[in-house]
Structures are given as C-alpha cells and as structure tokens.
C-alpha cells in the first residue's frame, strides 16, 4: 500500500512540475516576465527554470540580479554552457568586460565549435579596442564560419589595427561573395569617401542601388560621395530621398544644407543647417555655412552671430594655449634645451601676461645661456610688476626654474640685478 502511495505522490509531483514548466514557457512566450519570476519563485526550481528566471530578470532591466542567479547555477554546474553564455551577456551589459570575456572563453574551452560564443568573444575584443586580438580570433572563427558577419568583423578588426588596404580587400571579397550585404557596401563606401575616392564610392553604391535603392546606410554614402564630388543636384536628390524616409540625422541635414548652399538656394540651406544644429552642439564648419546662408537671406544679424561663434570655436582659448606652451617649456627643460625652453616660455607669457613669475623664469634662463642683456631686461620687467602684486612671497609652479619655492622673488631679482650692474660697472660697461 505504501508503495502505491509513493508512486502516486511521485507521479503527481511530475505532473505539477510539467504544468509549472509549461506555464513558465507560456509566460516567456508572451513576454510576461513578472509572471515568469513569480512562478519560478513559488517552488524549488531546476537549473533550466532558473536560467529562464535570469532571462526574465535581464529583460526587465534587473541585470545584476540576473547575473547573481546565473552565478549560483554556475557554482553548482560549472560546465552548463547556457548559464555561462547568459552570464557573459549580463556582464557585457554591466560593462564587466573582463568577466564577460572569461565566461565566453570558458564556453569555447568546453565546446570549441560553439560559434555564437566565439563570435561574441571576438566582437567584445573589437569593442574593447583590442584589434590585434580581435583580428586573430576572427581569422580563427572564419575557418569554422565564413558568414558575412564573421568576415565583416575581420575587416573591421583590420581597419582598427591600422590595415586599411587589407580591410578594403576584405570588404571587396565579402561583397563578391554576399552582394546583398549592405553593411559591407556602406563600410567600403565610407572608406572610399575618407580616401577621397568619390568615383569609387559612387560606382560601388550605385551598383548596390540597382538591386535595392532604399537602403539608408548605402544611400548615405552615395549621397555624401556626390556632395563631396560637387555634383550637388544629384546629392540633393539623394538626401531628399533620405529625409523622405525619416532620416533626420546630423550629417544628412548638414550635407543637404551644404548642397543647397552650393546651388545658391540659401533659404533651404538655412532650414536644413538649423535642423543639423539642433541635433548636437555645432562645429565651426556647420556654423560657417549657417552664418553665410543667413547673411544671404533675411537673417543677416543672426549670420554675424553664427560666424562669431565659429571664430570662437576655431581659435583656442588663451588658457589652453598657455597650458600647451607651459608643457612644451617643461619638456625642453627635461631635455636641457634651454634656448628652446626660453622660446616656449615667451609664447606662454603672451597667453598669460598676468603670470609675472614667467618674467623671473625668463631672466634666470637667459642668465643660464649667458645672455646678460636679456637677463637684465627680464629682471627689470619683473620688478616693475611688484606694485601689482598683493604679496611679495610666491610659491612657484612645479615647472618653474631655480630658486626653490617659498623665497622672496622680488628680493632675489633685485639682488641679481644689482650684481649684474656692479659687474658691468667694474668692467666699464654701461
């Protein structure tokens, strides 16, 4: 009797578990992730159901909880490839790149033929700008999977690794093998445009357009090539097609505006350049064309404002130039190139005329190279600034020359100047 009761209990448990699993699968299929989590939490779940729970948590944006769930599974089942892949995906979303690489690598060790893990591992190396490693892995992966996705990753890695010619040939081979791979066409078109081979970009993209004239990525490169080749009417037509399809990105609006400006349609140019300006903080080129377009329409005063903004962006701020020359002067100091250090310090002083300690530095640098006239000149100039200073004591910057900090610079300069004059007097010099 007890035997039959045990069998009935076990059978009933199996039925309930099957029903629960079916309910979880149905909820997952309906994207009802909260129900998935609730159903799994109601009873002791199997590793497979816990993986489903982790997927549901990740889909709800609770990625850290999902990762924690998966890590518990991996502790119990360290060779569960599905848990390892899902953990890698969570780490990638959480910007835990090294951990993600580790999980993918573990899957590849367990199953060298796991294409998905190898692809994601390689893609992560590329995204992490480890182009050499990504190239090596993509070449190894291509031996198992010669799909357009893998070959394109190889070409991108070559490009990142500073191998532009090799990447071009790789893209060409992909296009020959997979003529419908628009991403490779767009990538190669971009390379042609960057290299100013506009005819090549046009020929490539027009060949693709004969089979698909609607692809946005390819049409962007096609329109850009026409614009940069100064075939503005065709460029305008292509950009109009792009905007009609909902493309309102910065570069599309900008180059359409530039094309209208080139064909002297200034009102249209202004409209599109304003749209480009609204996409993000404008650069000097955008402000130039916008200002020029405004100056040829009713908004002349606005045009002046935009061009002044362009000038302000183009000319570096004095503080930036002062810092650059300060750094350059210190580099010359480190290499004991004193004459060049003096030149750099002079330039630094032009951008920081209130930094009077630079005159003091120039005096002692000039003295170092035996230029007494310049030493005297800079000491006198430095001493003339004394009335402008609230304090006589100054602490020099790390870059400053001798003497040591916390000294009276004006007293030091006065003593040095008196010493020079006494020496000149003894020599009979004026």
Image (tube, helix red, strand yellow):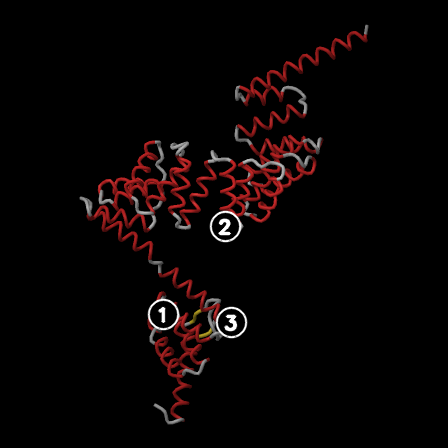
Which secondary structure lies at badge 3?
loop
Q: Which mark is residue 165?
A: 2
Is label 2 or label 3 in front? 2
**Whether label 1 touches label 3, CB < 8 Å:** no
Q: Which mark is residue 389?
A: 1
Q: Which quadrant of the view contains residue 137?
A: top right
How many residues crowd around disc 3 within 10 Å: few (fewer than 14), some, or many (20 or more)? Answer: few
How many residues crowd around disc 2 within 10 Å: few (fewer than 14), some, or many (20 or more)? Answer: few
Which secondary structure lies at badge 1?
loop
Q: Which quadrant of the view contains residue 372?
A: bottom left
Q: Of marks 1 and 3, which one's residue comes earlier in the chain?
A: 3
Q: Provide residue 229's location: percent of width, then percent of height.
A: 33, 47
Is label 1 or label 2 in front? 2
Q: Residue at x 43, y 70 (%)?
A: 394
Residue 357 visible in rendering: no
Q: CA distance from mark 1 to mark 3?
A: 33 Å
Q: Which mark is residue 335?
A: 3
* Left or right of residue 383, residue 30 in this image: right
Q: CA distance from mark 1 to mark 2?
A: 60 Å
Q: Is residue 107 above or below residue 351?
A: above
Q: Of marks 2 and 3, which one's residue comes earlier in the chain?
A: 2
Q: Is residue 292 above or below residue 183?
A: below
Is label 1 or label 3 in front? 3
Quadrant containing the C terminus in the rendered view = bottom left
Q: Is residue 380 above or below residue 254?
A: below
Q: Provide residue 186's location: percent of width, then percent of height.
A: 44, 40
């Amino acid at each position: 009797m007890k035997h039959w009761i045990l069998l009935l209990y076990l059978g009933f448990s199996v039925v309930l578990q099957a029903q629960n699993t079916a309910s979880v699968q149905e909820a997952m299929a309906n994207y009802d992730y909260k129900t998935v989590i609730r159903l799994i939490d109601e009873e002791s779940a199997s590793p497979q159901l816990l993986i489903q729970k982790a997927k549901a948590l990740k889909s709800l944006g609770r990625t850290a909880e999902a990762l924690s769930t998966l890590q518990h599974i991996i502790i119990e089942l360290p060779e569960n490839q599905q848990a390892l892949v899902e953990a890698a995906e969570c780490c990638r979303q959480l910007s835990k790149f090294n951990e993600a690489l580790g999980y993918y690598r573990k899957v590849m060790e367990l199953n060298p033929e796991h294409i998905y893990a190898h692809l994601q591992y390689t893609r992560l190396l590329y995204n992490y700008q480890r182009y050499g490693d990504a190239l090596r892995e993509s070449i190894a992966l291509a031996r198992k999977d010669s799909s357009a996705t893998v070959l394109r990753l190889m070409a991108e890695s070559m490009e990142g690794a500073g191998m532009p010619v090799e990447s071009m040939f790789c893209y060409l081979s992909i296009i020959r093998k997979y003529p419908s791979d628009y991403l490779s066409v767009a990538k190669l078109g971009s390379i042609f445009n960057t290299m100013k081979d506009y005819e090549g970009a046009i020929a490539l993209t027009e060949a693709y357009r004969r089979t698909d004239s609607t692809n946005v990525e390819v049409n962007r490169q096609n329109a850009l090539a026409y614009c940069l080749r100064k075939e503005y009417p065709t460029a305008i037509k292509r950009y109009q097609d792009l905007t009609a399809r909902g493309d309102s990105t910065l570069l599309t609006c900008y180059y359409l505006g530039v094309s209208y400006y080139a064909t002297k349609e200034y009102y249209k140019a202004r409209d599109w350049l304003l749209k480009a300006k609204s996409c993000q903080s404008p650069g000097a080129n955008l402000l130039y064309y916008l200002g020029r377009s405004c100056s040829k329409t009713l908004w002349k005063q606005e045009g002046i404002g935009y061009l002044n903004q362009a000038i302000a962006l183009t000319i570096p701020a004095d503080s930036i130039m002062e810092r650059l020359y300060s750094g350059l002067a210190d580099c010359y100091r480190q290499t004991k190139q004193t004459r060049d250090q003096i030149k750099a310090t002079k330039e630094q002083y032009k951008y920081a005329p209130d930094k009077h300690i630079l005159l003091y530095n120039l005096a002692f640098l000039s003295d170092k190279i035996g230029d007494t006239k310049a030493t005297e000149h800079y000491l006198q100039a430095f001493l003339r600034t004394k009335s402008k200073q609230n304090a006589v004591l100054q602490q020099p910057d790390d870059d400053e020359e001798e003497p040591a900090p916390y000294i009276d610079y004006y007293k030091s300069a006065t003593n040095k100047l008196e010493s020079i004059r006494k020496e000149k007097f003894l020599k009979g010099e004026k």
